[in-house]
Amino acid sequence: MTLRKLFQEDIIYRRTSITKFLKNSTRAGFFNARFCDVKKLLLRVHAEERRNFEGTFAPLVCPSLPPFYSPRDPQDPTLVFESRFESGNLELAARVSDTEYNLLLQNDINSKGHTQWFFFKVMNMKTGVRYKFNIANFVKPDSLFNHGMQSLVYSIKGFKERGFGWQRGGSDYLYYPNGLMRENSEKRHFTLSFTYQFHYREDEVYFAYSFPYTYSQLVTYLDKLEGDEVCQKYLLPRFLTRKTLCRTLAGNKCDYLTITNSGTSDQIKRKKGIVITGRVHPGETVGSWMMQGVLEFLTGSSPEAHAVRDQFVFKIIPMLNPDGVINGNYRCSLVGADMNRRWKKPHKIIHPVIYNAKRLIKSFASNFKLDLICDLHGHSRKKNIFMYGCNLREEPQICKLFPYMLSKASAVFHFPYCKFNMSKSKDATMRVALFKETRIPCIYTLESSFLGPDTVMDI
């Protein structure tokens, strides 16, 4: 059996087909067959999220698109699904019964796969009912869902009434090969099944693969950092500047930050450089949460933060793939390309962010001695935090020293998972491509598990 046959009947949600709405809405073009009008969407999302950045969570559903399915009457028990919001991903939903639903994730735009990230909303639920969800088109042969991971769940009523934010929830998790063949391939798909019991009637409940971190959330956070900096500039010397690296294919800004304490020309010249990047893979949201932690530390008032700003100049690109993040991709950009496989020869037009990021880093390296380049990622099959590095044959210990030091400083950093090889398949990654061109030994991919450490820790 194929996915096409599985989803032939009782379709109650379809993300990308809007033909049925065109007669009723002249503004149905918020989403076309493959991606949304990101500019119009983001203007609304940004205004909404800025209203109360700290507490609320309300991804914008495009107002011009009515629900794909509307309950026939108050007694209709059919769940209503929605994913047409920033970073949303759910392509199809089919009703098996009133309490069981088969779901299909959207492929990364202009690709035939990379299905892993999901982020969708459910409405019209009943309390006291155990619902079953089957997501049928995963492609990886193993998952952390087989090792204790649960989906992230956010209830609008739960937040309003009890202050609950994102929480892990659901039960009866199974991840298994389902026998459904992948298109034009001998390989098979995998299904994630789980059950969930809703706590409120007439609620809006979001499900996500990992804690979401949208492009609008990043923009709001950077605005806040800049606002704090402006407020303090008359009291303390400025240490943060924000500039636009370039525009993405969809016209979104890709910003980068420079963080360092001010000083004389000679003092600045004596400093060393550090580059930190994140979110080249859109679905690896843990990278953005790590990045926010980095920024909170570097822009903080602690003696340690002040000391590192005295010693280093930081160039930070928080989100390398804004278009992929906005449109709910897991791994690719709008052209269907993995941007972490384009660092060897990025194309100025097709891969504008990678092209300009590489130019920025090489220019930075020509003016400062770079001690560290680190790209933040998420890992879907291992626990803990670990690094992939390179290998200087004449002095292999140099590449291994920094990860080893991290393992001694943090119980969640697992040095045995670290690798320091440079296989041919990784030639065009940021780590290997920049290492071969610059010979900077400390270039790393930092991987953080979507699930967490091996053991529960006291915080």
Image: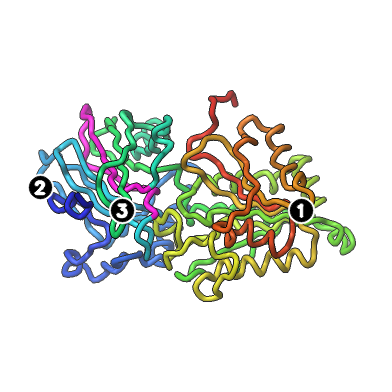
Q: Which residues are magenta?
A: 114-139
Magenta span includes 212: no
Q: Earlier in the sequence, mark 1 or mark 3?
A: 3
Frontmost residue, 5 versus 14: 5
Say the numbered circle drawn on residue 186.
3
Q: Is residue 239 left or right of residue 133?
A: right
Nearest the viewer among 345 and 446 is: 345
Above or below, comparing residue 328 to residue 252 in the picture? above
Badge 2 amino acid: Arg
Q: Quadrant for residue 273, please give it.
A: bottom right
Q: Earlier in the sequence, mark 2 or mark 3?
A: 2
Residue 369: % across, % down: 80, 59
Quick one: SS at disc 3?
A: loop
Between the C-alphas of marks 1 and 2, the distance is 63 Å
How crowded pointer 3 is (Cα within 10 Å; few <14, some 14-19, many 20+) is rated as few
Mark 1 or 2: the one toward you: 1
